[in-house]
Image (cartoon, rainbow, N blue to C red):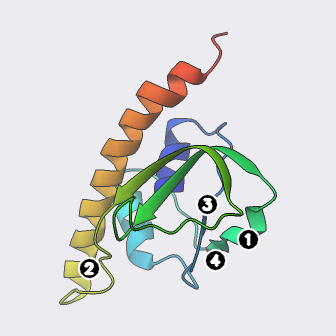
Amino acid sequence: MAEAILKSFDPALEIYSAGIAPAGHISPEAIEVLSEIGIKLAPSVPQHYSKFEHLEFDFLITVGDGTNENLKIPASIKYKRKMHLGFQNPYLHFRDRNDLKEKCAEIRDEILIELRYFYDKIISKDKPEN
């Protein structure tokens, strides 16, 4: 969701999305809650971080359970700055599909607010003016 949201602000951004232990698919709930705000997220298979180990990132944005302090970033990942968006994994505890979708929408909204601020205050300021 974070990649799709950030790309919605500026499709020209070069973004790589990967995980330490990626799921085998993008959830239908994530696709659905993003479509509710006009962001198209195509079903795909999340990437493993090792695919991008050869790159150095301007920003590493981590998303998920735990705190920034608890997060174990593999030493092979090179980055200049890091930001963590923490929330509880909605797929671990939910009553039914509607509950899961509501939790995913809440997380979508949190990610949207945080990334909007990040884009407006950091990325936009770093971009050269035309």
Decide if residue 1 is in sight here.
no
Picture quadrant of residue 14? top right
Question: Any mark on residue 100, and which?
Answer: 2
Q: Which residue is mark 1?
A: 50
Q: CA distance from mark 2 to mark 3?
A: 23 Å
Amino acid type, residue under disc 1 in the picture: Ser
**Residue 29: x, y in percent?**
38, 75
**Residue 83: x, y in percent?**
45, 48
Q: CA distance from mark 4 to mark 1?
A: 15 Å
Q: Which residue is mark 4?
A: 45
In this view of the protein, which residue sits in the foreground, 34 or 117?
117
Q: For the residues carrying marks 4 and 1, which lies nearer the camera in this image?
A: 1
Decide if residue 62 is in sight here.
yes
In this view of the protein, which residue sits in the foreground, 112 or 83?
83
Q: CA distance from mark 2 to mark 4?
A: 20 Å
Q: Residue at x 51, y 52 (%)?
A: 61
**Residue 51: x, y in percent?**
76, 68
- How many residues crowd around disc 2 within 10 Å: few (fewer than 14), some, or many (20 or more)? some
Q: Which residue is mark 3?
A: 17
79 sits left or right of 113 in the view: right
In this view of the protein, which residue sits in the foreground, 7 or 74?
74
Q: For the residues carrying marks 2 and 3, which lies nearer the camera in this image?
A: 3
- How many residues crowd around disc 4 within 10 Å: few (fewer than 14), some, or many (20 or more)? few
Q: Residue at x 21, y 80 (%)?
A: 98
Q: Residue at x 54, y 54 (%)?
A: 3
In what element is the residue under mark 2?
Answer: helix
**80, above or below 28, in the image:** above
Amino acid type, residue under disc 2 in the picture: Leu
**88, above or below 119, in the image:** below
